[in-house]
C-alpha cells in the first residue's frame, strides 16, 4: 500500500452525487445531463475532468494497480481520465484531451505533441466498454486551464510526458519484468498531465498524495474526502463538485 495523508472527511460530500443512467443512455448522452445536474451558475469559472472505468484486460490491470492508493485495497473504479473541453455547456463541439497509453496511429509523431491528443466527444467509448463514468467540476476557469495545456504540449524539454507512458504500457502488457509504476513513483500519464496544469493554476487535484503518484483514483479521493481542505484554500469560495455512475465492480467475496 502507498502511504498517503489521511483525509478528515469520510462521508460523501453533498455535491458529489450518483447520477444513474436513464434506460439506453450512452456515455455521450450522460455527460451533458451530468453537466446540467451540477447547476454551476457562472460556468466560465469551472473546468471539467472526466474519469472513466473500463472492464477489458488493460482496464482491469490499471484499476488493480490503483488499489494501492485505496485503504481497502479494492480495485479502483477508474482506468482513465481526461480534460473535457466544453464551451458554456454547448456539447455540440465538445472534445477531450488526454495522454493515451495506446497512441493513435493516425496522430502526428508523439514527441512533437508531448503525447497529448484531442478527440471529439463523440469518440468517447460507449457505456458497454466504459460502464463507470464521473464528471468532476473543478473551480478553475477553463480558459486558464486550456492556456496551460497549450504550453504543456510544447514543453517536452522541461517535462517529458512520453517517458511516463512507457512504463505504464509495459505494465499493462506484462512486458518483461515490468512492475506497477505507482510503486516506482510513476504517476498515470493523463493524471500527471492534469495535476500539473491544475497545479500551475493553484489547484491541487490530488491532495494528500505525492504529485508523482497522480492517478484517476487520487482525483476521485480528492473530491470525495478533501472538501474541507479546499474550503480553506479556495480563494473564490467554490468547491469541487461531481456526478458519477458506477455500473461495474469486480466480484470479490471475502467470506
Image (cartoon, helix red, strand yellow):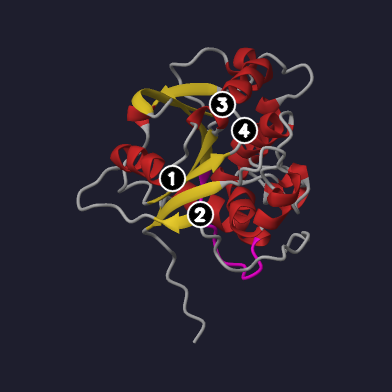
Which residue, given by chain and number where applicable, does mark 4 sit on? 140
Badge number at residue 100: none
Percent of width and height locating residue 43:
49, 31
Residue 214, magenta (yes or no): no
Which residue, given by chain and number where applicable, does mark 2 sit on? 15
**Disc 1 or disc 3, which is closer to the eye?**
1
Q: Is the Cβ of the residue at disc 2 closer than 8 Å to that at disc 4?
A: no
Q: Main secondary structure of the magenta part?
A: loop
Distance Cα–Cα, label 2 vs label 3: 20 Å
Mark 3, other Cα within 10 Å: few <14 / some 14–19 / many ≥20? many
Residue drawn 76% across the image and 43% down it: 211
Q: Nearer the viewer, residue 226 or 67?
A: 226
Q: What's the magenta region? A: 70-80
Q: Nearer the viewer, residue 146 or 53?
A: 146
Which residue, given by chain and number where applicable, does mark 1 sit on? 38
Distance Cα–Cα, label 2 vs label 1: 8 Å
Q: Is the Cβ of the residue at disc 3 closer than 8 Å to that at disc 4?
A: yes
Mark 2, other Cα within 10 Å: few <14 / some 14–19 / many ≥20? some
Q: Is the Cβ of the residue at disc 2 closer than 8 Å to that at disc 3?
A: no
Can you say whether 191 is above or below 65 in the image? above
Q: Would residue 80 be found to the left or right of residue 165 on screen?
A: left
Distance Cα–Cα, label 1 vs label 4: 15 Å
First in residue order: circle 2 vs circle 3:
2
Q: Nearer the viewer, residue 205 or 156?
A: 205
Residue drawn 64% across the image and 41% down it: 188
Q: Nearer the viewer, residue 204 or 239?
A: 239
Amino acid at each position: 500500500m502507498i502511504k498517503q495523508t489521511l483525509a478528515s472527511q469520510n462521508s460523501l460530500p453533498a455535491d458529489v452525487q450518483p447520477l444513474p443512467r436513464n434506460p439506453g443512455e450512452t456515455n455521450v448522452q450522460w455527460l451533458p445531463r451530468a453537466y446540467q445536474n451540477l447547476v454551476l451558475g457562472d460556468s466560465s469559472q469551472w473546468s471539467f475532468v472526466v474519469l472513466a472505468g473500463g472492464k477489458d484486460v488493460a482496464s482491469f490491470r490499471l484499476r488493480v494497480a490503483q488499489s494501492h492508493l485505496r485503504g481497502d485495497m479494492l480495485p479502483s473504479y477508474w482506468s482513465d481520465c481526461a480534460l473535457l473541453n466544453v464551451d458554456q455547456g454547448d456539447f455540440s463541439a465538445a472534445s477531450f484531451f488526454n495522454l493515451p497509453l495506446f497512441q493513435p496511429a493516425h496522430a502526428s509523431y508523439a514527441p512533437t505533441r508531448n503525447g497529448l491528443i484531442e478527440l471529439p466527444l463523440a469518440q468517447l467509448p460507449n457505456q458497454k466498454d466504459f460502464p463507470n463514468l464521473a464528471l468532476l467540476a473543478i473551480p478553475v476557469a477553463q480558459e486558464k486551464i486550456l492556456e496551460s495545456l497549450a504550453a504543456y504540449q510544447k514543453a517536452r524539454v522541461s517535462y517529458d510526458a512520453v517517458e511516463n507512458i512507457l512504463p505504464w504500457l509495459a505494465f499493462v502488457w506484462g512486458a518483461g519484468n515490468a512492475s506497477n509504476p505507482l510503486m516506482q513513483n510513476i504517476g498515470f500519464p493523463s493524471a500527471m498531465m492534469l495535476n500539473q496544469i491544475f497545479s500551475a493554476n493553484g489547484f491541487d487535484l490530488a491532495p494528500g498524495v505525492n504529485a508523482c503518484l497522480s492517478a484517476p483514483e487520487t482525483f476521485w479521493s480528492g473530491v470525495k474526502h478533501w472538501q474541507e481542505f479546499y474550503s480553506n484554500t479556495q480563494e473564490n469560495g467554490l468547491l469541487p463538485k461531481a456526478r458519477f455512475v458506477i455500473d461495474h465492480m469486480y466480484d470479490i467475496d471475502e467470506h
